[in-house]
Image (cartoon, grey):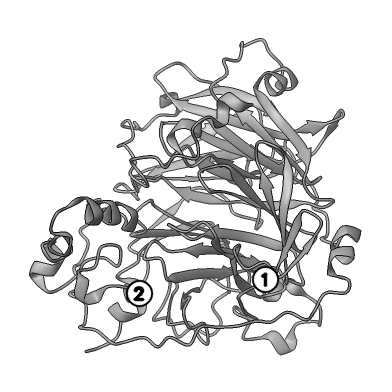
Amino acid sequence: MDSFFQGIRSRELNGFKVKKRPYVGDKATDFTELGALAVEHDGEETPPLAISFCETNKNSHILAVSDEDGYLSLFDSRKKFPSYASHQECSDTARISDWVAHQNAIFDICWIKEDTNILTASGDQTIKIWDAQEKKCIGVLMGHTGSIKSMCSHPTNSDILVSGSRDGSFATWDLRCNTTSKSEITCITPTSMVKRAHLSPYAKRVRRGKAASMSITSVLYLKDEVSITTAGAVDSIIKFWDARNLKTHVTQACPHPKSADKDRRLHGISSLSQDSNGVFLTASCMDNRIYLYNALQLEKGPVQSFSGCRIESFYVKSAISPDATQILSGSTDGNAYIWQVNKPEADPITLKSHDGEVTAVDWCPYDGKIATSSDDFTVRIWNIQSNNYSSSRSPSSIRRRIMAIPSEECRRLLMNEEPLSLTKTSNHLNSSDELLQVDLPNSIRMPTLSTPEAHKRKFSSGSDSKGTFDKTPEAAMKSPSSVLNPPSSLKRKTIRDYFLAA
């Protein structure tokens, strides 16, 4: 175990930078299944709910898997699996460790602090902080009153994160703010919380207690470091918020922004994702389409949409690749699909191997591997190769899901606690010059942008650091093209500033 985490406390020099992926052709033979891992404990199979590769280069081969029984498992994706090996044998070979993290389903996981810690969001209404090497809980985040369905850490400060819940709220947290401490476990409450963030316009007609009408299904902390994106189960609207002032959302986007058809059927969103630069966002919609947005042209609606998969449950997720060239999605029909971003009309690559609804998916940030999870109780690891590949198995029926009930542990931790103190910052936004809008061509050009983290390194290494910002093309044009690398005159502004008139 020590060898897998050796050196992970030293920050990777590349930061968010990702290598260009190998070219993906138009055939599924470009993807080879490396192995299928059985998700089971003591002989009992359980469906996986979330998967995540480590974020640093040295540990990107480690895959975390959470499941419906509350287990967290770590696997080594570098292992070689014989073709004759069973799913259980592959799992035993690749398993690094596993443990019971919650007495309830774990809906989302997130690596932080150079992969030394991992966060688990559960149906018991808590988020736990784990020492990944010691398998030890070092903190519990409490404040939601429903299952926590999604979370995302700050792009450069992993002590800060945002979470979304089935109770219709999303909350921000600061892991450095220790409210109380019970033995070695720190209890943390939210620094701010927004309730009823995605409420149905027909909420009065909905039976009381039907949380699906307002559930937050996905949250993102954008790469500008101050903007938060949320989506819900009620409709396909994506809302954008300024983390410094959460009184109301600053803008929103949806697939049909100009539609006045009140009878249009409302479709919820199952997941959001962003590339490593934060320029493009994807939204998996329950109308069986995945929409691609440019973060700086939200008022124009999606720049592209992708179809071919079936998104019939909120467990089906999608993810854009770190370099923004491909989109990977699960599907209710038992397949996984991959689209080329610059070829939205082309048929997607179909990965046929699972026997149940394909749910969570993930890209390895430093090589061509991907992982897909399914209700067939397996997680499959794939690689881009040119070997023959075939599959003839068909998907099975969708497995039922458990209802989230607060655990006894959660109730015990909440006893004798003081009421939550939900504080908000009061910083006000300043208006800026209107952004020069650039229409995207049919073939999307991938942006060559660096991240805030890269700018900070560049800032500290140069002799004239101020000039580093002022000499960017955006500064020379007096019209920034991204919230990621603003010139010094626009430092610390958010997406909102780019949509306000002068």
Q: In the drawing, what numbered circle is on residue 356?
A: none
Which image quarter is the N terminus in? top right
Residue 151: image location, x then y, percent? 59, 60
* Crowding at mark 1 (Cα within 10 Å: few <14, some 14-19, many 20+): many
314, 195: nearer the viewer: 195
* Image depth: mark 1 or mark 2 in front: 2
The amino acid on which the numbered mark 2 sits, given as a three-letter code, is: Ile
Image location of residue 415, percent across then percent down: 88, 71
Q: Is residue 342 left or right of residue 120?
A: left
In the rendered structure, the answer to whether residue 273 lies left or right of residue 448 reads: right
**Mark toward the start of the polypeptide (1 vs 2):** 1
Front residue of 142 and 374: 142
Residue 495: image tag:
2
Q: Residue at x 74, y 43 (%)?
A: 136
Q: Nearer the viewer, residue 419 or 206?
A: 419
Residue 352 seen from this side: no
296 left or right of 481 in image: right
Q: Could you tell me residue 481's position as x and y percent?
A: 21, 66
Where is 322 relative to 126, above or below? above
490 is higher (above) or lower (below) than 181: below
Residue drawn at (41%, 66%), measured in percent from left and top?
A: 225
Type of amino acid under label 1: Ser
- Tag 1–tag 2 contact (CB < 8 Å): no
Residue named by callout 1: 215
User: Please, is residue 99 above or below residue 296 in the view?
Assistant: above
Q: Secondary structure at mark 2?
A: helix
Q: Residue 142 in the image: x percent, y percent?
A: 74, 67
Q: Nearer the viewer, residue 324 or 488?
A: 488
Q: For label 2, count other residues whose C-alpha is less than 10 Å away and answer few (under 14), some (14-19) or many (20+).
A: many
Gap in Å between the C-alphas at discs 1 and 2?
24 Å
Q: Quadrant of residue 235?
A: bottom right
